[in-house]
Image: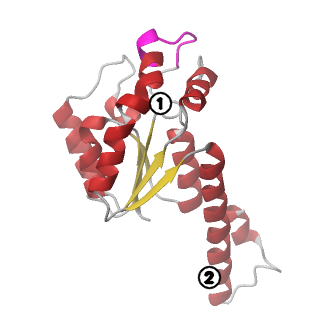
């Protein structure tokens, strides 16, 4: 898993999941919202966004988080793993409510304290309007590794397992290099 896209309904926690995945794997992380949006809430042109995605996609390792349905198939064609946070609507609504008024590292502006009705409606309708298309696209790219998590607990469990495997692999590498992680655990602490 070296080229990963993380998709899901707004409020599902794509950016938080992606940051944790980045912390565990060290893969470069690209938030599409930070690429596409400017502080004044204007956006790149579609052509500019596609160019940026292709530039990232041409590199050897990355995580891209964000939905952007118009570029989803392009990103699926470039990745080797698709992670879909397929959470219930109420979980996503709680997610967008929890981040109101917060400064976020994945957005170039601070979220407003009040939510726009159109945005809330898009979250409420995601399951019926967007999810079927996402699942069809995942099916279309069936040769890719696809992970579909139905709850935050499943997603967190995956990250915990990945972190544990990463610690073990790092520990083994230290021993292979002639280091003793027991008497000198300093290099290992970054993985715990």
Give the structural element (helix, strand or loop) at label 2.
helix
What secondary structure is the magenta-colored segment mainly? loop
Residue 57 visible within the image: no
For disc 1, the marked residue is 10
Earlier in the chain: of badge 1 and badge 2, it is: 1
Residue wearing tag 2: 173
Instruction: Name the residue located 25 percent from the left edge and 56 percent from the top edge.
Output: 77
Residue closest to the eye, 63 or 140: 140
Q: Is residue 66 visible?
A: yes
Q: Nearer the viewer, residue 115 or 32?
A: 115
Quadrant for residue 142, please give it: bottom left
Residue numbers of the magenta segment:
111-119
Dot 1: element = loop
Pointer 2 local density, CA inside 10 Å: few below 14, some 14–19, many at least 20? few
Quick one: 100 or 185, which is closer to the camera?
A: 100
How many residues crowd mark 1 within 10 Å: few (<14), some (14–19), many (20+)? many
- Which quarter of the image is occupied by the C terminus? bottom right
Disc number placed over residue 118 in the picture, else none: none
Q: Judge from the rendering whether residue 51 lies leftward or rightward of residue 151; answer left or right.
A: left
Tell me: residue 133, above or below residue 138.
Answer: above
């Amino acid at each position: 898993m070296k080229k990963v896209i993380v998709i899901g309904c707004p409020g599902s926690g794509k950016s938080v999941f992606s940051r944790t995945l980045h912390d565990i794997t060290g893969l470069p992380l690209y938030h599409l919202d930070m690429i596409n949006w400017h502080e004044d809430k204007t956006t790149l042109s579609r052509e500019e966004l596609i160019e940026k995605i292709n530039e990232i996609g041409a590199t050897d390792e990355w995580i891209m988080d964000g939905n952007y349905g118009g570029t989803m198939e392009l990103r699926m064609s470039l990745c080797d793993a698709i992670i879909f946070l397929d959470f219930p609507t109420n979980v996503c609504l709680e997610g967008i409510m929890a981040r109101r008024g917060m400064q976020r590292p994945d957005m170039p502006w601070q979220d407003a304290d009040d939510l726009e009705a159109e945005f809330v409606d898009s979250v409420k309708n995601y399951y019926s309007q967007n999810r079927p298309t996402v699942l069809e696209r995942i099916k279309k790219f069936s040769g890719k590794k696809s992970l579909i998590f139905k709850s935050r607990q499943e997603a967190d469990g995956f990250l915990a397992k990945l972190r544990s495997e990463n610690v073990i692999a790092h520990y083994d590498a230290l021993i292979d290099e002639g280091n003793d992680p027991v008497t000198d655990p300093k290099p290992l602490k970054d993985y715990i």
